[in-house]
Image (tube, rainbow, N blue to C red):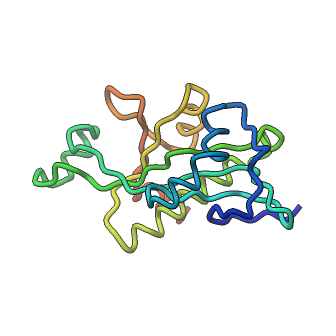
Amino acid sequence: MALAIAILEKAHQRSNFDCGRLILDNYIKRLASQDVKRDLAVCYVLCDSPDNTVLGYYTLSSHSIKLEELPEELVKKLPAAYADIPTILLGRLAMGKAHQGKGLGQYLLIQALNQCAGLSERMGILAVMVDPIDEKAASFYKAYGFTALPGSDRMFMTVKTILASQQG
C-alpha cells in the first residue's frame, strides 16, 4: 500500500470512513469539502494509492487566542500590546479504525506540526492549538508535547517547541 497526504478533493473516497467517533466521521463525509470551499479550514487526507481511499485526516485553520488565556510564564515573554496571539488550530485529527494502532495517527500529527512550522517561516504563529475530543485524545496530544491551557480543556504547543523537536 502506497500512502500519500494530499489536500481533500472530490476524487478522495471517504464515504466508508469510520474512526469510531460519529462527529469526526460525519465531518469528513459531509462537511470538510464545505469548510475548504469557504476557506474556513484546509483538510489534509492520508490516502492509499491508487484508489484514493481516505485512511485518516487532519484540518488546519488560522486561529488566535487571548493573551490572558496563555500560561503566565509564556505571557511574561510576550508584549502586552497584543491582546490576540496568532496561532494555528489543528481542528480535527482522525484515523480510520482499520488503521488505528499502527503509528499512522502519529504520522499525521507530525506532518501537521511540520506543516505549521513551515508556515511559521512566512507568517507570525506562536503556537498550534488543539481541542481534544476526549481524555484519550488529550493523552495522545500530551504524549507528543502538548500542554494544557490553564482552566481549559484546550492544549497547545509552541512553534519553538516544534522547531526544536525537528532539530533533535
Where is residue 75, by image quadrant? top left
Residue 158 to residue 119: above or below: above
- Report the quarter where the C terminus lies: bottom right
Of 32 and 160, nearer the camera is 32
Q: Farthest residue toward the bottom?
A: 122
**Residue at position x 69%, y 62% from top?**
10
Q: Farthest residue toward the right?
A: 1
Percent of width and height locating residue 101: 78, 39
Q: State how many labels appear.
A: 0
Of 142 and 25, nearer the camera is 25
Quick check: 107 left or right of 150?
Answer: right
- Report the quarter where the N terminus lies: bottom right
**Residue at position x 33%, y 56% from top?**
126
**Residue at position x 66%, y 31% from top?**
22
Percent of width and height locating residue 124: 31, 65
Of 73 and 13, nearer the camera is 13
Percent of width and height locating residue 14: 74, 50
Residue 19 to residue 136: above or below: below
Percent of width and height locating residue 134: 55, 27
Quick check: 85 left or right of 148?
Answer: left
